Amino acid sequence: MPHSMTVRVYYEDTDLAGVVYYANYLRFIERGRTEALRAAGVDQGRLKAEDGAVFVVRRIEADYLAPAKFDDMLAVATRVEAMTGATVTMAQEVARDGVILFRARVVIACMGTDGRPRRLPGVVREALAPHG
């Protein structure tokens, strides 16, 4: 099941044409990933403090399909697509009233606070693994 959250478009999110500025979709999906991790039981602050592990975006593929506008209520859906030893691939969509406006595939990598790549901690693997 994908995680879903809502985001309202504010005036500050729009460009001169009155539509959501393209880079703000990246902000929306960042919030979606953070909330999906939180809902799965991954506390990123604790992970950094106790395990010295943080996440960084390694790769993103994005498709802009239709514009969002001021005051729209958007649904940001996030689901884990794949995991390797050190990365998680997430599929994300931003929709308005069931119509997909933006779609992205994001690879996040685990990194130590020393800046070096590292394996995903076991608690993260367990939290994000399919259950059932």
Image: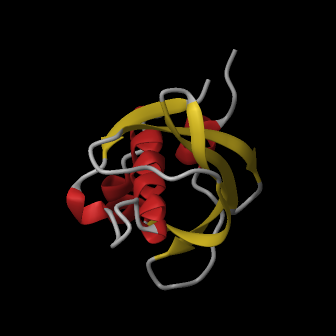
Where is residue 62? Give x, y as percent.
Answer: 66, 62
Q: Quadrant of residue 93?
A: top right
* Left or right side of 53 for 81: right
Q: Residue furthest left?
A: 11
* Left or right side of 66 for 49: left
Please report the residue visible at 29 percent of the width from the left and 50 percent of the height from the top: 70
Q: Quadrant of residue 5?
A: top left
Q: Residue furthest top?
A: 132
Q: In the depicted view, which residue is nearer to us: 32 or 126?
A: 32
Please report the residue visible at 64 percent of the width from the left and 52 percent of the height from the top: 65
Please report the residue visible at 36 percent of the width from the left and 35 percent of the height from the top: 6
Q: Quadrant of the C terminus?
A: top right
Q: Quadrant of the N terminus?
A: top right
Please report the residue visible at 76 percent of the width from the left and 47 percent of the height from the top: 82
Count of numbered badges drawn on the protein: 0
Q: Residue furthest front?
A: 17
Is residue 35 positioned above or below 1 on the image?
Answer: below
Q: Residue furthest bottom?
A: 115
Where is residue 12? Give x, y as percent.
Answer: 23, 64
Q: In the depicted view, which residue is nearer to us: 32 or 84?
A: 32
Where is residue 50? Give x, y as percent.
Answer: 36, 59
Q: In the depicted view, which residue is nearer to us: 69 or 10?
A: 69
Where is residue 85? Give x, y as percent.
Answer: 74, 58
Is residue 129 positioned above or below 28 on the image?
Answer: above
